[in-house]
Image: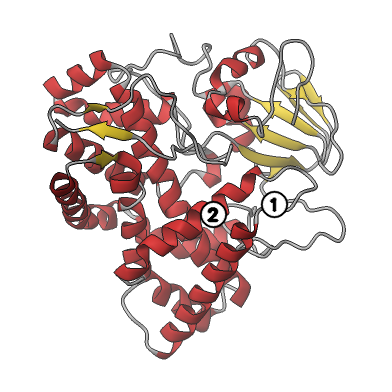
Amino acid sequence: MSEATGQIYFNQWDPAFRANPYPYYKFLYDRPPVMLPRMELLPPTVLVARFHDVQAVLRDHAHFSSVQQFPPGFEPRGPFRGAATMLFADPPVHTRLRKLVSRDFTPRRIREMEPRIREIAAGLLDAVERKGEFDVMADMANVLPVMVIAEMLGVPAEQYATFKRWSDAIIAGDNALPGTEPPAEFFEASNALRDYFTAQIQKRKREPDADLISALVQAHEETDVMTADELIAFVLLLLLAGNETTTNLIGNGLNALMRHPDQLALLRRDFSLLPKAIEEMLRFDGPVQSTVRFTCENVELGGAQIPANTACFIIVSAANRDPAQFPDPDRFDITRDPNDHIAFGEGIHFCIGSPLAKLEGSIAIGSVLERFPKLRLKNPDTPVNYKGSYFLRGLAALPMAIE
């Protein structure tokens, strides 16, 4: 997307825009959703940024569909190959798929995982101490979430680093310009992930285990609730979504905390504020910038008439800084109450892994602060670099001084 009318500028491929999109969102709060000029190869697109408009769309799957729309003759070549997933499905398909995994993300199951997550975090920080250097992304944020979700799936430890590399390559593919192909690494990673999990699924058919892949294979074999394509896409989604958003929560959260020393000092004085701090990190600079819905018919939203088959950019991060919903929205305040952000979505697509993400984020950030009482940004005046995707907002690196 490029610029629309007046002072509105929206360009997801502009590195400066991706680095700090929040100032640009300010021009979207005092008007109805804005239709962007039509671009070749893309459907009509509208920007939805105000909190109550975003909330209304996310709660209304009957008029705003999550099913991806592709041009005639287009053949999906990403990791999912066009198969239905929870992320890109409406009821009843979404209901059927979500039910399959919900039992593995219950509050009880998440509580049972806490000791193991703490063990992983402690081991990672032991390695940081031995090394004497700390990059939050490379040493903690990139590693902890993929280890947790990979263990749930039954993936051996020696594959963790490879999985993260594949995941990063697939996410970076979001940044391809219209009419251009993603880089070769995107297709290589997509194919490698599919090949790996296709083999793992076949293995679980022969030798079932106590992991999540085995449970999904069993459901597929016994009840036929998933097609073979849905099964592989389901596992891939769990791996990608199960690590990337939590990685970004840890990195973005610690970056915000370090750049607001008054809030860091407050948290150090009172660690009981950590749950509220996590919520404010999610609101202030959340792991997901935007998601997309498609109008099923002509609809009215927030005073705008939106035609059928329009792509709606639902800018969750803009909604979380809407001054009509959040007083002084650009202030990072770990005591903010209430803090009814929608960083994990809303409605039927509310992130099923949000309790796990919050737990991992709390353990990671809390462990880092406890282990390193003198923790500070190594290069506070150097701009941070963000990875390629606009939709998933995450840092490439975050060097810290620990002494």
User: Which of pointers 1 and 2 lies earlier in the amino acid sequence?
Assistant: 1
How dense is the environment of label 1, judged by Cα within 10 Å: few (below 14), some, or many (20 and up)? Answer: some
The image shows residue 313 at horizontal and vertical percentages of 67, 34
Inspect this view and state whether residue 67 appears: yes
Viewer-proximal residue among 78 and 383: 383
Residue to which mark 2 is pinned? 169
Left or right, 327 with respect to 182, comes to: left
Inspect this view and state whether residue 59 appears: no
Viewer-proximal residue among 182 and 8: 182
The image shows residue 116 at horizontal and vertical percentages of 19, 58
The kind of residue on which mark 1 rests is Val
Residue to which mark 1 is pinned? 67
Left or right, 151 with respect to 403, comes to: right
So how many labels did they put on this image?
A: 2
The image shows residue 157 at horizontal and vertical percentages of 30, 68
The N terminus is located in which quarter? top right
